[in-house]
Each structure stands twice: as structure tokens, then as C-alpha cells.
Image: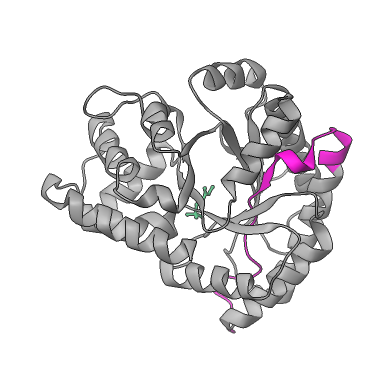
Amino acid sequence: MSITQELRQTAAAMVAPGRGILAADESVPTITSRFRALGIDSTPESRRRYRELLFTAPGIDAHVSGVIMHDETFQQADSSGRPFPEVLAARGILPGIKVDTGAKALAFSDDERVTEGLDGLRERIAAYRTLGARFAKWRAVFTIGFQRPSANCIRANAHALARYAAICQEGGVVPIVEPEVLADGDHGLGRCDEVTRHVLDAVFSELRLARVDLAGMVLKPSMVTPGRTCARAAEVEEVARATIACLADTVPASVPGIAFLSGGQAPDVATAHLDAMARLGPHPWQLSFSFGRALQDEALRTWAGDEANVAAAQAVLLRRVQLVGA
Ligand code: 13P
């Protein structure tokens, strides 16, 4: 099989009907703040135990096609010493790795960020691939505000996403391309729609320039919603219709799948939005999920750092992936 065929097959498997991606790639500072909020100590061992709970939860393989890990987790192993990428692969779950090094201050801008991590990326992708990675993730963030995001911020992030995606594909790893329009702010749904369209247009224009095979990638966008502090909330149906209309105008049909992030939406809300969008189909691409908080929050709260709660937390995770998968 050629590398292109293999990438296309992997991308299709990531968004296979009824299955989606568990985003468990929180950086050490991020998972530490989520642990702290629940009074859980954050050490390499407590983080390892938490990820073992997630990755070995009985039954989740029916709905979880892949797991995104952070470097620390990718190098860790289960209690019997089996590396996590192998643990997942043995269950038919594709191992994935977050490869960006974070959103850093954009020069000549006091409030915008550009995601970094291109230096040495080719070598890192090759090393992760040897350790079993089948896909990677790179997240760019865009904040909505007065004259924000700027044209410079959109162009810089779209360009970096495309260079990352091309390097991944050259190295035999499927890129998840994640341009996240943040929900922070009091803007309305219409403004989110406008910004998301600009961002996606720029991203696909750069992906084409970089000769990325659109059939061998997965898009991970945010949904079109009003800002978190907007005075007017939107109905589930309104979010679903706006999001699908936006994507239909900007995402080529050759992209096999769209795996949404949850962006801080409550688990039930994110699940309802995805369900409503699926019902508006058929769509040219497979609709799926790559949720972090919306899949993990309930399980993390149930576990609360106590070994006695592992089975209960795994049952809660299974219930949520069943709902989202459906
Ligand atoms: P959330 O679903 O919690 O937004 O996380 C998804 C993700 O991977 C963000 O990069």
C-alpha cells in the first residue's frame, strides 16, 4: 500500500461511523490545574494512573477510534509495564500524539498568539511513528474581539498548520488540523460564524499551497456558537444549523471527517450539538468528535484520585462515549 493510501485509510478509521477520538493530551500544567480543582495531587505517577484508567476502560473501544496523548503520557506505560501506545493499539485504538509546543505571543501584537513547534518536527514525527503514533494534533487558537483575530494572526496560524500537516503526511502520520475559534467573549453567533469562515478559508488555502492531501487528514474545528458571556444564548438547533452551513461553505468534500472539539461546553450540551448536526445529514464528510473535557470531566470527578473509584469512573466514561458515539 502506498503511503497516501495508508494515510487515507487511517484518516477514515479515525472518523468511522459511531466512533471518534478521545483527546487526553492535556499538557502537564493543564492537567495539573484540572487535578487541583478536585484536590488531586499532580505527579507523573498520578497522571499515569489517571490515563491508565481512561485507556483501559472496558468497552470504550467500540466508540473510541483513537486517543491523543501528550509526550509525557506517550512515553508512559500501564501498571504491567506495557507502553500506552501498545496498550491502545492492542485494543484497536489508534495512538495519537500532540506535537505543537503551544500558543506563544505573536510578535508586534499584545494579545494574540501563534502556535509554535515546527523546529525539529520532521525528526519528532519520525520518532513518534516508530513508537506507534498513527496520527498527530496541532492546535491553533483565535480569540474574537474588536478587530480580532487580526489578518496577521489568521495567516500565521494557518501557515503553521499547513506546514505541520505536510510534515506529518510526509512522515506517514495523519494530521489533525485544529483551528479553534475560542468561545471567550460576549460576541453573538453571527460574529463567530464570520470569524470561523475566515479562519477555515485561510487554513484550506494554505493546506492546498503546502500540497497536503485533504483525504489524508482530519479537521478538528470548534462549533459556531455565541460567546460564553453573550447576552443571548442559542438553541441547540441554531448552533447545529449555523455550524453545518459554515462548514459546508468552507470545508472541501474530499476531507474525510470533521471531529469537533468540545471547547468547554458541558458534556450534555456538546453531545446534543453533535447529535443535532448529525441529524441534518447526510453530509459530505463524516461527523465525529475529538472531545477532551466533554468526555473526561464526569470520569475525572468520579475518580477524584482514589483507586477505589476506578471502576465507577470507567463506567461513567463508557456511558459518555456511548452517548457521543450514538
Ligand atoms: P476540549 O474538547 O476540552 O475543548 O479539548 C479538545 C482539545 O483537544 C483541545 O485542543
Magenta run includes residue 224: yes
Q: Which residues are magenta?
A: 206-232
User: Is 207 left, or right, of 47 in this rendering?
Assistant: right
Magenta run includes residue 55: no
User: Is 310 left, or right, of 196 in this rendering?
Assistant: left
User: Is 159 left, or right, of 263 in this rendering?
Assistant: right
Instruction: Place residue 157 in its image quadrant.
Output: top right
In depth, the one of 147 and 81 nearer the eye is: 81
Give the image location of residue 175, x and y in percent: 65, 36
Can residue 270 be seen here? The reply is yes
Query: Does residue 274 lie above or below 25 as drawn?
Result: below
Instruction: Place residue 199 in its image quadrant.
Output: bottom right
Give the image location of residue 303, x and y in percent: 21, 52
Residue at point 48%, 72% (across, down): 269
User: Is 275 left, or right, of 155 in this rendering?
Assistant: left
In depth, the one of 68 and 213 nearer the eye is: 213
In depth, the one of 60 and 314 nearer the eye is: 60
Q: What secondary structure characterizes most of the magenta part?
A: loop
Q: Quadrant of the N terminus?
A: top right
